[in-house]
Image (cartoon, helix red, strand yellow):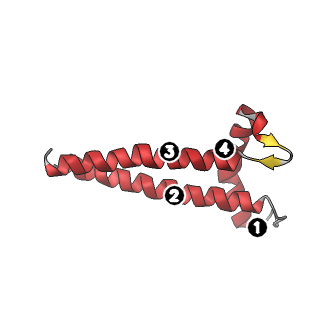
Amino acid sequence: MLFGYILTGLGYTLHILLNAYMWIVIVGALLSWVNPDPYNPIVRFLRSVTEPLFYFIRMRLPFLRAGGIDFSPIIIIAAIYFLDYALAGYLIALGTRLRMGF
């Protein structure tokens, strides 16, 4: 029974973390459209947490950068949605079943 609560808590925590990172990716993608101050601490933080993953996707899937449009944030957001639905949803459902005694 305690394990069910732990799994449910892990699932909800993962859900919150994935959603927070999704918004960080969205803001990071929007920042690429404007020319923000590169010395601003917020801009530096956003770039430091998004650019490594953007770069990884760009190098693995170079055809996604067509016509000057970078589709790597869309791929990352789709992966976050998949992980949120598949992994976090599974942990929450499994924890709920264990708590209920099924």
The residue tagged 2 is 19
Mark toward the viewer: 3 or 2: 3
Q: CA distance from mark 1 to mark 3?
A: 32 Å
Q: CA distance from mark 2 to mark 1?
A: 24 Å
Mark toward the viewer: 4 or 2: 2
| Amino acid type, residue under disc 1 in the picture | Asn
Q: Identify the mark at residue 40; answer none if there is no mark.
A: 1
Of labels 4 and 3, earlier in sequence is 4
| Amino acid type, residue under disc 2 in the picture | Asn
Q: CA distance from mark 4 to mark 1?
A: 21 Å
Q: Identify the mark at residue 82; answer none if there is no mark.
A: 3
Residue under the image location 73 percent in, 46 percent down: 71
Q: CA distance from mark 4 to mark 2?
A: 16 Å
Q: Is residue 18 shown left or right of residue 66?
A: left
Mark toward the viewer: 1 or 3: 3
The local crowd at label 4, few if under 14, some if 14 to 19, many if 20 or more residues have their Cα within 10 Å, is: some
8 over 57 or under it: above or below: below
| Amino acid type, residue under disc 4 in the picture | Leu
Residue extending farthest top: 60
